[in-house]
Image (cartoon, grey):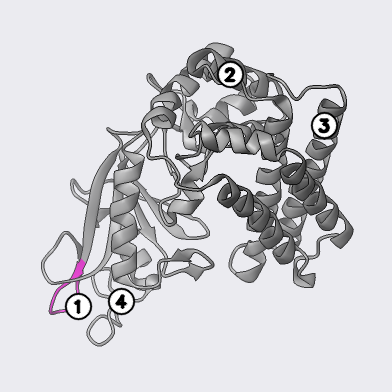
Amino acid sequence: MRDDVAPTAVRGGPDLVAKVTFLSQPGHYPGHADRVETIETHMSWLFLVGHDVYKLKKPYRHERIDYATPAARHRNCMREVRLNRRLAPDDYLGITRLAIDAHGRLGLDGRGRTVDWLVHMRRLPEAFSLERRLRAGTVTPVQIGRVVARLIPLFRDAPRARWSIRGYQRHLQATVSDIATALCRPVYGQARRTVESVAAGLHGFVDAHADLLATRVRDRRIVEGHGDLRPEHIYLTTPPTIVDCIEFDRELRLHDPVDELAFLAMECDRLGHPEIDGWLFAAYRARSGDRPPRPLIAFHKALNAFARARIAAWHLDDPDTGPPRHWRAVAADYLDYAHLQLGCLDDATSHGAAGAD
């Protein structure tokens, strides 16, 4: 295949293979970079070119995610840039057209018909990622405090969810039920007894702590946040940079800040750093004035792990995401973690830890 021609361009437009082939070649970028590093994820391709990153969304549709058409990918690229500029204002540079001319030649921001869109970002130094620093054992309480300080304005100023007290409780219960139903599919290979035990514990918390959850709604704590606050999305730059929020579904960005921080603490726990939990919530209490009780934190850690188990299992629906045994094992690990957190929740409640942490 010639590197400047997509064989399917004239009639139906270039397919994903043709787009990836074109974007993998350094001569097609401004400044003619020396090399292109490519990274494939479940829903996108990343092209690392010098100091820049270009992100091409796959024509993917599953549950709440719809990238199936160029128009849908364009909307999501625009939304991704807008939302991520809240926490990384200098790093989301905009969107870039992928066009095809009358001769079937692809080009970035070139002449011709637009066939796709890419998010254009500044490349962040991997050595500064929180995940990398955790693995190296070099993260400090001061650095975690700066991450929380970066998040506080978002939690303070973001649009509030319009859920009623009962609506929020129904949302949590429905989320638990949906996850449990998915994870009980035999193809995912998860222990049904464990799935049902975790679901029962989470449902039980929502019922038993209705007053606590109602207070979170009355205090307008449920906001349009980040939605995917994992260590690999946080860079310990000055100030910290936080990327890759969920852009495709607003409801998945609606969280209590305690939920967001519990998700991050959960992922840090799984990397072998349980101390991050204490640092996160100490900084949050000091900067926000909010004093979430320990059972609420444990609940959100368990619920987030339950949700991550489902996401891991979803990879089994796509034969191109790697060995099925890997994703079954990842899902089982998250389930075990959720079960453990529910035990911690019971211990905290039995010792009268329903007050502030």
Mark 1 to mark 3 CA distance (whole Å): 60 Å
Which residue lies under the disc numbered 1? 104
| In the depicted structure, whether residue 141 falls above or below residue 240 | above
| Place of residue 270 in the rendered image (x, y in percent of width and height, measured from the top left) | 71, 36
Q: Secondary structure at mark 1?
A: loop
Name the residue rendered at 73%, 54% in the picture.
Answer: 331
Q: What is the three-letter code of the residue carrying label 2?
A: Val
First along the sequence among labels 4 and 3: 4
Name the residue rendered at 81%, 56% in the picture.
Answer: 195
Q: What is the three-letter code of the residue carrying label 4?
A: Pro
Q: Is residue 324 visible?
A: no
Q: What is the three-letter code of the residue carrying label 1?
A: Gly
Mark 2 to mark 4 CA distance (whole Å): 45 Å
Mark 3 to mark 2 CA distance (whole Å): 25 Å
Mark 1 to mark 4 CA distance (whole Å): 9 Å
* Span of residues in magenta: 99-106
| In the depicted structure, whether residue 38 falls above or below residue 348 | below
Tell me the mark number nearer the camera, choosing from 1 and 4. Answer: 4
Which residue lies under the disc numbered 2? 139
Residue 344, labelled with which disc? 3
**Contact between labelled residues 2 and 1, with CB atoms less than 8 Å apart:** no
- Residue in front for this viewpoint, 122 or 82: 82
Tell me the mark number nearer the camera, choosing from 1 and 3. Answer: 3
Mark 1 to mark 2 CA distance (whole Å): 50 Å
| Place of residue 178 in the rendered image (x, y in percent of width and height, measured from the top left) | 67, 62
Q: Residue 101: within the magenta?
A: yes
Classed neighbour count for the residue bearing mark 4: other residues with Cα under 10 Å, few (<14), some (14–19), many (≥20)? many
Q: What is the three-letter code of the residue carrying label 3?
A: Cys
Residue extending farthest to the bottom is 11
Q: Secondary structure at mark 4?
A: loop
First along the sequence among labels 1 and 4: 4
Classed neighbour count for the residue bearing mark 1: other residues with Cα under 10 Å, few (<14), some (14–19), many (≥20)? many
